Image (cartoon, grey):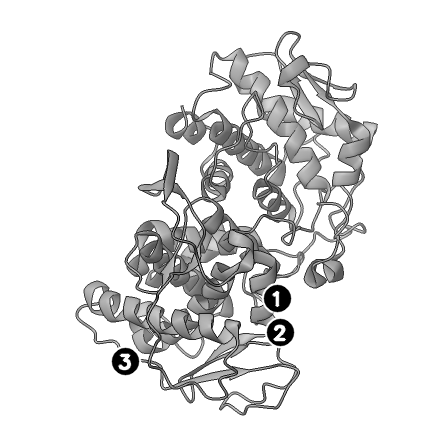
Amino acid sequence: MALAVVLVAGTACKDGGGGLGVSGDTPKTSPGDIAGLPVTHFESGLKQGAPKPDLQVRNNGNTPEDELAIATIADVQGYWTEKLPAEFGGQKFDPVKILVSYDSKGADQKTACGSTKGQVNAFYCPPDDSVAWDRGGLLKMLNKRFGPMSVVTVLAHEFGHAIQFRLGQKAGVGKNTPTIVKEQQADCFAGGYMRWIAEEKSKYLRLSTSDGLSSVLASMFLIRDTAGKSATEQGAHGSAFDRTYAFQTGFEKGPKECAGMNEENIKARVTEEPFVKGDKGKGDTKFTKDTVALLKSSLDEAFKGAGVPGPQIVDEGAGNCGPKSTPPATYCADNNTVSIDGEKLNILAQRIDREAEWQGEDQGGMGDFAAFAEVASRYVLGIQKGVGASLDNANAGLRTACLVGAWAKFAKNPPPGQKLKLSAGDLDEAIADLLLPNSLISADGNGVRPPSGFQRVEALRKGYLEGSPVCSTQFG
């Protein structure tokens, strides 16, 4: 019995409504730590009064998207002018030679890599050292759906490829380097640049570490590979889990760490893989009484080492624990049960409509693993209570997300007798759910969630990659 495969990105909250200018609001902070930075709250995007870059751009449409793109290119070149010599033995940075703006529905703009007609894309072209972007399709859609920093992220990623071209063997990149290595490095380089903005070093842009970073991560989900693709295929960019891993690595550790990503260490942790042979449902299963029973068995087995009784899971509407109820699933501490609303969770578990997702329309459900993970998050509250951990301290929500990640790893290769098994794309569903404002996966016993999507995603990832011990040591 496999878990779900598809992810929702478009429903994630965006920062600042997608406008290009930001107000002069006073930055606010809340408790938390984003790789050593405070959790900040303000509108992200172009700074008021930012200078106008002196860059030559072929076919500049003078649209808001071009204004943002040109400011980004100027800014990211400033970042690499500083970082390339500092991180790579004094190597001087040479600006990209050609910048091209185009409309995928408009006139063709030739590059050394071919035509731009119909290319809803942004790309780096090594033969003529150019960066090109679709202002009328891709950038407009991203800005509308996720806000301006999603545009910045995509262009920073493409500029990461330009940096690979400049570094060459210093980044271990050559003619035969697998696509997944190049793409993971580029995502990582983009993460390093985003930290520079978050540290208020940019002349053009500002980025909050709460909603701003959440919108960046949400936009990366939209451009993930389709579930079931193999990381060894030509053109593979990675699952959403893999892409956010690379981005967060760059944000936390910087460009030298990114250049160290290679085929060996990426293969050891990448999650993108084909569906298992014989999986007729392509990872999708229904949320029913029977699958909830399989979920309960899986959770009991995964956490039996805690030495405490796991909660019972009952379908009683999820609202019977008084003011601490957290529909559609609630942990009731008084009787150690997880009370669920099976009908609502069944809606959440529906397969997403990928075409509707790209169009910014209602995608349907979130996929079955999103629903299972929400129930699992309430279950692990019972385990935490049983071992004496607080259910409402500052780290309770992150510890909960971490334990859900640890359970997901258990379900990846379950022992004999366990029929619920992690499938391709399931982790993407969980992370997409984590980025929503009402997700339970990282909520504490009162339903309170950590303010930053970056923190929430990182906690689940740590549990999956490092196991349950890290959940206590880091989020005790």
Tag 2, which secondary structure? Answer: loop
Residue denoted by label 2 = 137
Q: Earlier in the sequence, mark 2 or mark 3?
A: 3
Give residue 368's quadrant in the image. Answer: top right
- Label 3 Cα neighbours within 10 Å, binned few <14 / some 14-19 / many ≥20: few
The label on residue 94 is: 3
The three-letter code of the residue at mark 1 reads Met
Of residues 335 and 107, the one drawn nearer to the viewer in this rendering: 107
What residue is drawn where x is 38% and y is 86%? 56
- How much space separates mark 1 and mark 3, taking CA atoms? 31 Å
Q: Earlier in the sequence, mark 1 or mark 3?
A: 3
Most extreme residue toward the left is 90
Give residue 95's quadrant in the image. Answer: bottom left
Question: Of the residues tagged 1 and 3, which is closer to the observer?
Answer: 1
Query: Does residue 400 appear to the left or right of 3 in the view shown?
Result: left
- How much space separates mark 2 and mark 3, taking CA atoms? 29 Å
Residue denoted by label 1 = 141
- Label 1 Cα neighbours within 10 Å, binned few <14 / some 14-19 / many ≥20: some
Query: Does residue 233 appear to the left or right of 68 in the view shown?
Result: right
Q: Is residue 303 above or below residue 235?
A: above
Asked if labels 1 and 2 touch by Cβ distance under 8 angstroms, the answer is yes
Tag 1, which secondary structure? Answer: helix
The three-letter code of the residue at mark 3 reads Asp
